[in-house]
Amino acid sequence: MSTTSDTISSISALLSLSDSQYRIYDIGRRVDKISKEQFEKIEAAQLPYPYPIQGHALLAIAFWQKQSASPYLWFIKLPLDERGLLNQGARNHFIAIIIEALGDNLTVSPTEQQEALLKKNPYHFTPVQYKLAAVNSVVSSLLKQNASKFYAPAQSYLSGDNGWQYWQEIGVQGLSDFAFRLNEVNNNDTLANALSYLPEQVLVPLCSALENITLSAEVIMQITSRFQREINDNNNTAAIALLRALASSTEHPFSHEFLTSLITNKALNDEILIIIAGRLWPILSTEKVLFVYLEHLIKDNDNELFSAIFKDLVAIPLIRPVLLQAIRSPKRSPDLAQAIGMLFKQ
């Protein structure tokens, strides 16, 4: 079969023509699956990108041939326009580079020359370690492959049987594999029991993995309980990590009540305000909570922080209509009205 970039108008079409099975994930904020139907609409500029970050879509695409158990992974960073739609020119350029390097068979082993072409691809990026670990975990879980060799030591450590102080051999990939296998054996109970005791060196990377998982009520209760303890001890690093762990669980009643109460009743530092916008944004989808959150942002007259977070939130399709309604609302405080005014003077 001979194809050219002229006849392939989308990444979806490119993957289908190569006879590949594939899955698409957003990895800009959390690791979120994007369905094929949703991605086709995104590519056709019929839907704004659901999880934009700094004006871009950060994608992980896993694809494999039916007869092969070994998936290929692409990490792609594509710009979005001011409406949050995929930049069609950049997408087409990406396709052209791939076809020039590999033709229509995406699963050939590239020659050195082809490898050099692929490496020059301006849309390729390397995810941070914990995101890469999460993608590896989700793909191996999807394909029903065995977890990495790091899984068993992490599972054994989290059981607590050998003592919480012996964490030095535990790896990020093992913790990630554990997080993506909470429905196996007794992993959920093991996690709920461990959360009170984990040293920060394990808690922080584990929470980075848990941010991609919908958690059980027991685990959420343990996370919120540990958060209160860390906040009382002024341990901001652990507190931030624990908030992140709730990122895919904001709709659970326990999380929702906890986060709403946190935003409504507590003084919040800048790092917590940033993590709410970056990871916990669904909690801001009602005008009432959003107003309180915006008041936190302007408490120190920090126009820079307010501007940066406003630009981040207004790009998220879920939050955009609520935020635009809120900034026009007669219910806004004089201070908030002033901050919004400053925003539009820039």
Image (cartoon, rainbow, N blue to C red):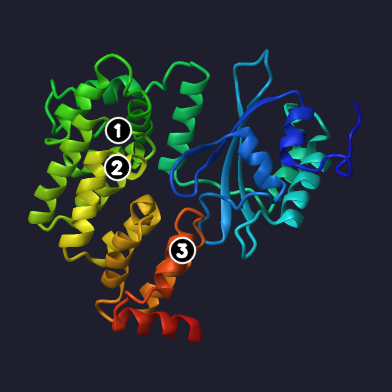
Find numbered disc 3 in the image and state the secondary structure of the residue it sits on.
Answer: helix
Q: Which amino acid does label 2 sit on?
A: Ala
Q: Look at mark 1 in the image and give the residue it sits on.
A: 215
Q: In this view, does 114 lie above or below 316?
A: above
Q: Look at mark 2 in the image and give the residue it sits on.
A: 245
Q: In this view, does 287 lie above or below 190?
A: below
Q: Pinpoint residue 262: horizontal percent, then vertical percent.
A: 19, 56
* Marks 1/2: CA–CA distance: 9 Å
Quadrant in which the N terminus is drawn:
top right
Most foreground residue, 222 or 322: 322
Q: Pinpoint residue 294: horizontal percent, then vertical percent.
A: 32, 69
| Earlier-in-chain disc, 1 versus 2 | 1
Most foreground residue, 342 or 128: 342
- The structure residue drawn at horizontal position 63% and vertical position 48%, both measured from the top left corner, is 124
Find numbered disc 2 in the image and state the secondary structure of the residue it sits on.
Answer: helix
Residue 65 seen = yes
Residue 167 seen = no
The reply to whether callout 1 and callout 2 are in contact (CB within 8 Å) is yes
The reply to whether callout 2 and callout 3 are in contact (CB within 8 Å) is no
Q: Which of marks 1 and 2 is in front?
A: 1
Q: In this view, does 289 lie above or below 113?
A: below
Q: What residue type is labelled 3?
A: Asp
Q: Is 328 positioned to the left or the right of 89 in the image?
A: left
Q: Is 96 positioned to the left or the right of 120 in the image?
A: right
